[in-house]
Image (cartoon, grey):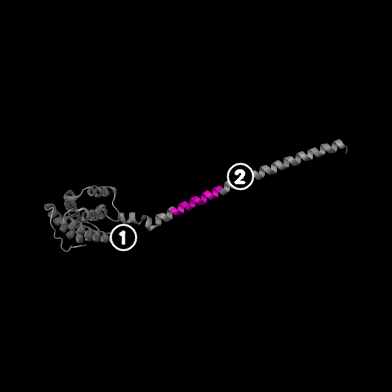
Amino acid sequence: MSNEQLIKSAHIWALALLLLCCVVVAFAGTSISGSQNSNQQSSNTQTGNKNNSDNQNSSKNPNAVGERAAMTNLSAADSKFIMEAAMGGLMEVELGRLATQKGSSAAVKEFGQRMVDDHSAANTELMQLASTKGITLPTELDEKHRKEVTRMSNFSGAEFDRMYSKSMLSDHMKDVAAFEKQSSKGTDKDIKGFANKTLPTLKEHLELAKALNGSSSGGMKTGNSNRP
């Protein structure tokens, strides 16, 4: 074989080898890409399965849905009553503390302390009752009631006494009406029982509030509270 033929043959083999390398590289790249896509799809599938599992676990978690489930077991009226009673009780305690600090008369200060004592006791019992129903009651005032406490805190002296007395009369008239309705028309026996037990104390508060509105000075007989 001549030198020219040898050179030509070598060129052909070199070209063939180059083409073979290109094919191998292209194939390898395709395999890697396919593997990456497959891994990504597998990862997405696992993530999706995990999310579905988490959602299922959440839906089965009594802590996540217990409150809603318990609330649906109560009538709308019972649910509304217990939530409003809790919020109202919190506000009575806050306003009572304010009265002991800002009240100018002994009567207002005594009444304020009575509100703190009686409503704190009622709030504790209501919280315990709610826990047996799987219900989470508020532990702090909402914006509406917080604004009322802030409004009352802007008064002082005789003006505070007058505004506080007026507020307590109005609040306890509403409270007595609400608790009387619950005690007669409530459907949950435990919540109805709480209303019946607390009602005498609220009626006593109402009478004290009426007396407080009729006098801006002097002491006030608070007596032993018929606390729940």
Per the image, label 1 sits on a secondary structure element best described as helix
Magenta includes 53? yes
> Could you say which is closer to the camera, residue 158 or residue 90?
158
Instruction: Tell me if residue 192 can be seen.
Output: no
Left/right placement of residue 47 relative to residue 73 reads right
Between tags 1 and 2, which lies in front? 1
Give how far across and how far down residue 79 sits, in percent.
27, 54
- Say left or right for 95 vs 42: left
Identify the residue shown where x is 81% and y is 39%.
10
Q: Residue at x 59, y 47 (%)?
A: 36
**Nearer the observer, 172 or 196:** 172
- Give the residue at mark 2: 33
**Residue farthest along the top direction in this orientation:** 4
Q: Position of residue 185 (x, y in %)?
A: 20, 55
Q: Residue visible at 76% across and 38% down?
A: 15
Which quarter of the image is occupied by the C terminus? Answer: bottom left
Give the numbered dot on residue 131: 1
Q: Quadrant of residue 59?
A: bottom left
Q: Amino acid at mark 1?
A: Ser
Residue 95 versus residue 132 in the image, above or below: above
How far apart are the alpha carbons under marks 1 and 2? 57 Å
Rendered location of residue 221, percent (x, y): 13, 60
Q: SS for tag 2?
A: helix
Per the rendered image, the range of residues in magenta is 40-54
